[in-house]
Image (cartoon, helix red, strand yellow):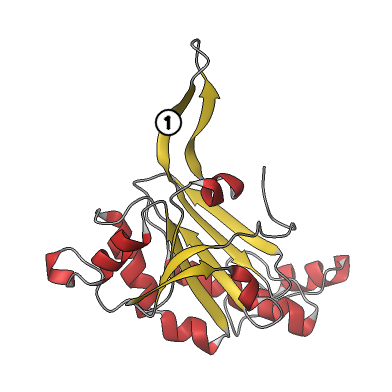
Amino acid sequence: MSLVGKKAPSFCAPAVIDGNQIIEDFSLEQYVSKKEVIFFFYPKDFTFVCPTEIIAFQSKLKAFEERNVAVVGISTDTEETHLAWLSTPKNKGGIEGVTYPLVADTAKTIAANYGVLGGEWHYNEDGSIAFDGLPIAYRGTFLVDKEGIVRHETINDLPLGRNIDEMIRLIDALHHVEAHGEVCPANWQEGKEAMAATREGIAHYLSNN
């Protein structure tokens, strides 16, 4: 079930912040009433597509910060594995230089609550707990507003990397809607014409585009 329009599931978990410090009680609650958050799940540390996304978010971090948006990553790896990966140079497969938080979801409960875990638990014929699928997260991306409400989500299969620029476009669209009370049509970009959410507004937009 989609989380759009609902409160982002809360959690408190270990994380690595600033690329070098483990804390035990990271939560998205710290951003409520202060910042929007791009909260993204990735499958595993020390893999292939994942570092390209994580480094791409870092390369665009200034653009997010200019928009008062926090970026937070998360996988089902441990905080120690996150720290080891963050300490490994890029030319050796690491993500050294990444400064935004990476959360450790070792219990897999956060991924399950956000609907991105690649499988599910069940009881087998012997009455034992078993898991079907992959016990890692899909590439889920959530835009959480300042009230803690999910305004956008996408979930990609494991081999499909994200478009980071699209996250920035969505943030710009959200800010435009909040500032001007207009709606943003298909392929809208910052600086382009939006439209009033009326029949007249739609007719005016379509006749000029």
Give the residue at x 69% y 55%: 4
Under circle 1, the secondary element is: strand
Answer yes or no: is residue 188 visible: no
150 vs 184, nearest the viewer: 150
Q: Is residue 158 above or below residue 207?
A: above
Q: Is residue 200 above or below residue 109?
A: below
The image quarter containing residue 132 is: top left
Task: Return the x and y of residue 196 as percentages of the image width and height.
Answer: 81, 74
* Residue farthest front in this picture: 24
Q: Is residue 47 above or below residue 196?
A: above
Give the residue at x 40% y 36%: 134
Task: Return the x and y of residue 159 as percentages of the image width and height.
Answer: 34, 46
15 vs 116, nearest the viewer: 15
196 vs 137, nearest the viewer: 137
Task: Check disc 1 and report the residue beneath it.
Answer: 133
Give the residue at x 69% y 71%: 184
Inspect the image, locate mark 1, and give the three-letter code of the amino acid beneath it. Gly
Q: Quadrant of the C terminus?
A: bottom right
Task: Return the x and y of residue 189 as percentages of the image width and height.
Answer: 57, 76
Give the residue at x 43% y 50%: 106
Q: Horizontal placement of 55 versus 168: left or right?
A: left
186 vs 104, nearest the viewer: 104
* Residue farthest bottom in this picture: 66
Q: Quadrant of the N terminus?
A: top right
Total tally of numbered discs in the picture: 1
Answer yes or no: is residue 145 visible: yes
* Residue farthest left in this picture: 92
Task: Return the x and y of residue 112 as percentages of the image width and height.
Answer: 56, 44
Q: Horizontal placement of 165 versus 37: left or right?
A: left
| 10 Å crowding of disc 1: few (<14), some (14-19), many (20+) | few
